[in-house]
Image (tube, helix red, strand yellow):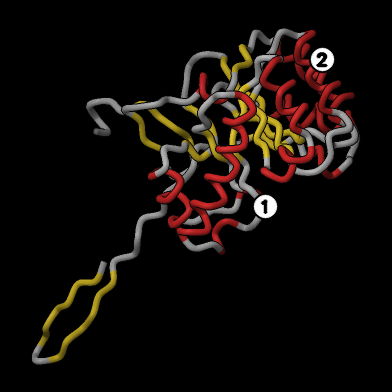
């Protein structure tokens, strides 16, 4: 937004910087609740094993799927849904979304959600930008289409193949009430680390829920760190 100020016949333009719109990285809650998520873009070698591990620990999570992954593994999409996990949108072609115009952003989101809904019969309202890359244009466009834009505050770094022990230590040392943990469905050591992580989190009495059950759907704001908080009389 531009403001024009006239001083002694000279016209100066003063531009107000647009406030940055931030996705949800975690949730402010006193309850020992967290969410675990898996991004799926390339490969599906370990997906069924992950589903079986999650079933063994009676844990439901959120899987963010890319359209070309859906096209390649439609039966696995069905299995994720049948096992009771939530499915979110992870774009159509896995681009850097901040580099796209509004029309292209809408196309990326709509293509993927339509594919998911066709297979599962369920509407999609969660979106995770590839690479965690976003800007205000993406946020405004996604929000206008009814999506909650989701990031993470605990990164397992499973895609770096550091090994199961590193993953276990990273997640357990960083998780706290309201955390959103990032994994990938086809990383080499995730199936080795996940049982240890789930067992320990349950010993610590954390409840693990899909992201849509962790986040607030109304009457909230997101602070500068990406923490979603409930509004009260002092911050309304």
Mark 2, other Cα within 10 Å: few <14 / some 14–19 / many ≥20: few
Q: Please give the name of the residue rendered at 69% of the width and 34% of the height, measured from the top-left corner.
A: 182
Q: Is residue 133 above or below residue 115?
A: below
Q: Please give the name of the residue rendered at 71% of the width and 28% of the height, measured from the top-left corner.
A: 77
Q: Is residue 214 left or right of residue 154?
A: left
Which quarter of the picture shows residue 112?
top right
**Which mark is nearer the camera, 2 or 1?**
1
- Please state the horizontal and vertical placement of residue 119, each as a whole percent of the image: 64, 28
Foreground of the two, 80 or 201? 80
- Please state the horizontal and vertical placement of residue 188, each as a whole percent of the image: 90, 35
Q: Is residue 136 visible?
A: yes
Q: Which residue is mark 1?
A: 93
- Please state the horizontal and vertical placement of residue 74, each as a whole percent of the image: 74, 32
Q: Which residue is mark 2?
A: 52
Earlier in the chain: of badge 2 and badge 1, it is 2
- Please state the horizontal and vertical placement of residue 232, each as a whole percent of the image: 27, 25
Q: Secondary structure at mark 2?
A: helix
Image quadrant in which the N terminus is located = bottom left
Structural distance between the alpha carbons of marks 2 and 1: 28 Å
Q: Please give the name of the residue rendered at 47% of the width and 36% of the height, measured from the top-left corner.
A: 148
Q: Is residue 162 above or below residue 1?
A: above
Q: Please give the name of the residue rendered at 49% of the width and 28% of the height, measured from the top-left corner.
A: 27
């Amino acid at each position: 937004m531009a403001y024009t100020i006239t001083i002694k016949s000279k016209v100066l333009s003063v531009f107000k910087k647009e406030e940055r719109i931030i996705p949800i990285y975690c949730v402010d809650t006193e309850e020992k609740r967290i969410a675990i998520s898996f991004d799926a873009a390339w490969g599906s070698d370990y997906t069924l094993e992950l589903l079986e591990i999650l079933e063994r620990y009676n844990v439901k999570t959120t899987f963010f799927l890319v359209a070309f992954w859906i096209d390649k593994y439609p039966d696995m999409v069905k299995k994720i849904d049948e096992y009771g996990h939530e499915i979110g949108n992870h774009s159509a072609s896995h681009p850097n979304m901040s580099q796209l115009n509004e029309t292209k952003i809408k196309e990326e989101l709509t293509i993927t959600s339509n594919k998911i809904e066709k297979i599962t019969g369920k509407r999609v309202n969660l979106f995770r930008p590839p690479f965690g890359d976003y800007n205000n244009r993406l946020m405004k466009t996604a929000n206008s289409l009814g999506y909650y834009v989701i990031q993470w505050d605990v990164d397992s770094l499973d895609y770096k193949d550091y090994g199961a022990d590193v993953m276990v230590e990273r997640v357990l040392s960083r998780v706290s009430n309201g955390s959103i943990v990032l994994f990938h469905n086809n990383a080499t050591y995730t199936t080795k680390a996940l049982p240890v992580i789930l067992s320990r989190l349950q010993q610590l009495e954390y409840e693990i829920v899909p992201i849509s059950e962790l986040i607030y759907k109304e009457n909230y704001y997101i602070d500068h760190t990406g923490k979603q908080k409930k509004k009260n009389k002092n911050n309304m």
